[in-house]
Amino acid sequence: MIVMKFGGTSLGNAERIKEVSGLIEKTGDNFVVCSAMSGVTNTLVAIAGSWRDKDSEKAFALVDDLEKKFHATCYELFDDAESSALTSQCIFDHFSVIKNRLNGEYDLNEENWLLAQGEIITSRLMVDYMNWSNISITWLNALELVRTGADGEPSVGDIKQRLRDRIGDNPCGRFLTQGYICLDNHGNIANLRRGGSDYTATLAGAALGAERIEIWTDIDGVRNNDPRIVDNTFPIRELSFDEAAELAYFGAKILHPACVWPASSNNIPIHLRNTMEPNAPGTIIRSDIGKKGITAVAAKEGITMIQIRSDRMLNAYGFLSSIFGIFEKYRTPIDVITTSEVSVSVTIDNAGKLDKIITELGGLGDVTVHSGQAIVCVVGDILEQHKDRAVKILDSVRHFNVRMISFGGSKNNITIVVPEDEREEVLRSLNSFLFAGNQSKTVAHD
Ligand code: ADP
Ligand code: ASP
Ligand code: MG
């Protein structure tokens, strides 16, 4: 079984949906995970915002636009109104329910319900179109398959069991379900965070013991730097699971931050492919790659840096664990950490519990908070052949306000923290330093 995930950009309009259907048809037995058509989740987020702000005029105007977009795609897909009647009715019914609910009170559960509609309607549209084109494929409800536990995370074992109940032990044929959406442990509709369809795909791949997981998007694989910011980036043909996980976690938008572990822990390769150029090689992510050199750079913004300073740290033990205990209590992961004899600096990207964390940290020492920071991460074999490479990387960012440096946790990554407004320039500077002249290569050489 092959898992194929199609992102919103691959499903942008009727033409793209037709192409994607062809790609699905050509692959043998497969399990397809699809996102919402491009732009739909952003619009749903905007509708939810207007609903929360009680701006119903704006909310309804946005809903009308969205409904028109789906109807227009439907008419284009099925060529004539008669053959599209059933799907068109289904879109109409969905939007009637959305409008009805928008007349009610906003709350977070309602917002999550609304955000799930993009994937639900898109997946219906795809399956109806494929079945109409004589490509047999079974629609599966992701809300019956993916459920998070008390920790807010899904488990492969649980999905495996639910899939087995639904499609049996040795499924064959084609199946299609929605990415991103799930139920939480109370049975309410939730999601795997923005970009979560990648995560659904790798979870499904692990649960099915898939041969490989194909993630189809609008670009020829993972590039060595963020192509939205830096010119002259180039595709990386092979990445190790560890490198891919670091890049995804530290901001390479092409992959959801958590999507690598289900594949790596089950040793299932991930193949990133370009829907616009299906014959392009893309990027293979797997365990056994033997290349050396610096692979890529990524950055994540919206980071908060917290510094705790206390003379009590000198020669003390247990101090770090008291600090970590507070973050654990508020279920806030720490990304980067640096220490000196009298102070500890950490970064977090979820500042939801920041006030409570600061109050409790105040009992341990003086606390300073800097919001608006960015983490920039250089991934690859930093030390293997060139012992001075780490120093050179730092030299290339000497003109910036580097607030933290983390190196040594693994030889695969060096991480710095800079103010958010310097992020783009840092990415460009690292690019010219690490990759100048390397446009067609997969690794950088000194
Ligand atoms: P999809 O809708 O298919 O999920 P996304 O928009 O989530 O696609 O991810 C693909 C986009 O990620 C690309 O169009 C590109 O702009 C962006 N991106 C950011 N960093 C990278 C990178 N290192 N390599 C490739 N793409 C990247
Ligand atoms: N549609 C969702 C989003 O835009 C999930 C995804 O694209 O993976 O975030
Ligand atoms: Mg995505």
Image (tube, rainbow, N blue to C red):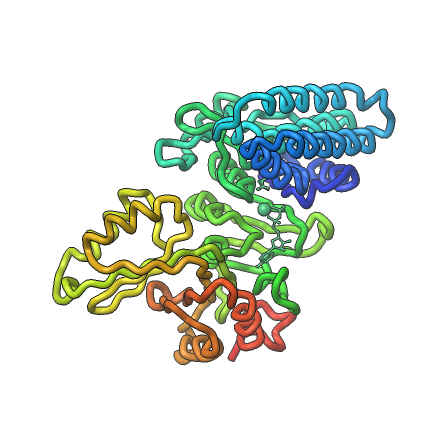
Q: Of residues 94 and 390, which is closer to you in this image? A: 94
Residue at horizontal 73%, vertical 50%?
276
Q: Of residues 286 and 403, which is closer to you in this image? A: 403
Q: In this view, does 336 lie above or below 263?
A: below
Residue 167 spot, x, y in % from top left: 54, 23
Residue 356 spot, x, y in % from top left: 30, 45
Residue 150 seen anywhere in this rendered image of the structure: yes
Q: Of residues 413 and 75, which is closer to you in this image? A: 75
| Location of residue 405 by image quarter | bottom left
Q: Is residue 169 above or below residue 32?
A: above
Residue 287 seen anywhere in this rendered image of the structure: no
| Location of residue 427 by image quarter | bottom right
Residue at horizontal 69%, vertical 37%?
24
Q: Of residues 196 and 398, which is closer to you in this image? A: 398
- In the picture, measured across the screen, residue 220 lies left or right of residue 201, that is right
- In the picture, measured across the screen, residue 337 lies left or right of residue 125, that is left
Count of number-bearing discs: 0
Q: In which quarter of the image is the N terminus?
A: top right
| Location of residue 127 by image quarter | top right
Residue at horizontal 38%, vertical 53%?
348
Residue 336 spot, x, y in % from top left: 36, 59
Residue 102 spot, x, y in % from top left: 60, 25
Residue at horizontal 70%, vertical 48%?
275
